[in-house]
């Protein structure tokens, strides 16, 4: 029986991403409860909580730690130099100092790293294509996220290219969500774009509930928020990334060293549009955009 620790960024039970990882392991021949067991925790994107949970996983003698955020990965790296760490959905692992390079990660960390900040500008383009009348867009950023500056630069570049006014709205802890929404309204934003962040993901229900009364179109990097009522998303397929991460864990459990396994980037991207939300907002999505969508929620 091998033991794998999963430092999740969502509810520890019923987390779709964790389930996708387990399915990936099962597809490779690992049977939960017979050949492998999992220790799943939930850091909610909290740096302090992540460190404590990594300690718990190590105390349970896990052989590999699977992480779903830069915060969790960094906490694991600070705690252990020997237990392999497999990243599943990390933004710019090189730029964030988590690995030396994609080809030669070095140390005890490898896995998947995406360039969501490069795709962030594309998300704004898709939002503008969906609602061409937009001129003022609020960018919701978590300044505690190491990649927030890259997201903001991408938003500025895209906004300039499209002739849009991009409005920076900073938020950290969920306790600040209300103030952030008030700022969105005060700046007369006509739409909101939310970047991929563990805090926003873990609290996506609360964030959606607060944004809904504004009746503004909301675009997300991650598709699960669109399925929860957002208007549009564009980014990597999160579940596919978690399934793929199982290949790294499989190799490590069979003797491979993380330093010898190059970090890969996601290859599956998806455009998701929620037509139900569009109708509720009185919007008509161009047919040309609907035809390009990977999923249209009716």
Image: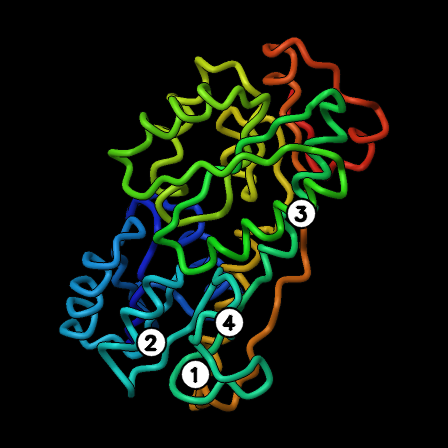
Q: Which structural element holds mark 1? A: helix
| 185 left or right, relative to 159 | left
**Distance CA(mark 1)–CA(mark 3):** 35 Å
**Distance CA(mark 3)–CA(mark 4):** 18 Å
- Residue 252: which numbered mark, if any? 1
**Distance CA(mark 2)–CA(mark 3):** 35 Å
From the image, state whether disc 2 or disc 3 is nearer to you.
3
Which color scheme is applied? Answer: rainbow
Q: Is there CB contact under 8 Å for labels 2 and 3?
A: no
The one of 63 and 104 positioned closer to us in this rendering:
104
In the rendered image, the quadrant that contains the C terminus is top right
Residue visible at 66% across and 39% down? 124
Q: Earlier in the sequence, mark 2 or mark 3?
A: 2
**Distance CA(mark 1)–CA(mark 4):** 25 Å
The one of 244 and 192 positioned closer to us in this rendering:
192
Q: Earlier in the sequence, mark 2 or mark 4?
A: 2
Q: Which residue is mark 2?
A: 64
Q: Earlier in the sequence, mark 1 or mark 3?
A: 3
The vertical placement of 214 against 134, above or below, is above
**Residue 154 position within the rendered picture, expressed as x and y whole percent measured from the top left:** 62, 51
**Distance CA(mark 2)–CA(mark 1):** 8 Å
């Amino acid at each position: 029986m091998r033991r794998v620790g999963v430092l999740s960024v969502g509810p520890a039970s019923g987390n779709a991403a964790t389930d996708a990882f387990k399915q990936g392991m099962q597809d490779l021949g690992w049977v939960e409860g017979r050949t492998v067991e999992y220790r799943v925790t939930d850091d909610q994107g909290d740096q302090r909580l992540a460190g404590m949970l990594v300690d718990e996983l190590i105390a349970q003698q896990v052989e590999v730690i699977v992480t779903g955020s830069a915060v969790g990965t960094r906490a694991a790296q600070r705690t252990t130099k020997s237990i392999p760490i497999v990243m599943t959905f990390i933004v710019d692992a090189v730029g964030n100092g988590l690995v030396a390079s994609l080809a030669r990660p070095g140390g005890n960390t490898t896995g998947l790293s995406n360039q969501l900040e490069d795709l962030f500008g594309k998300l704004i383009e898709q939002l503008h294509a969906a609602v061409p009348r937009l001129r003022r867009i609020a960018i919701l950023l978590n300044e505690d996220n190491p990649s927030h500056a890259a997201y903001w630069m991408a938003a500025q570049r895209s906004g300039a290219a499209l002739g849009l006014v991009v409005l920076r709205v900073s938020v950290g802890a969920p306790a600040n969500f209300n103030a952030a929404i008030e700022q969105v309204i005060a700046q007369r934003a006509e739409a909101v774009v939310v970047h991929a962040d563990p805090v926003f993901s873990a609290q996506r229900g609360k964030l959606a509930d607060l944004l809904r009364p504004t009746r503004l179109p909301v675009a997300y990097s991650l598709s699960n928020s669109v399925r929860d009522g957002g208007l549009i998303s564009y980014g990597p397929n999160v579940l596919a990334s978690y399934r793929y991460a199982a290949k790294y864990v499989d190799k490590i459990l069979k003797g491979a060293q993380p330093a010898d396994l190059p970090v890969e980037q996601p290859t599956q991207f998806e455009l998701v549009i929620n037509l139900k939300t569009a109708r509720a907002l009185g919007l008509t999505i161009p047919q040309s955009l609907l035809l390009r969508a990977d999923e249209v929620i009716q």
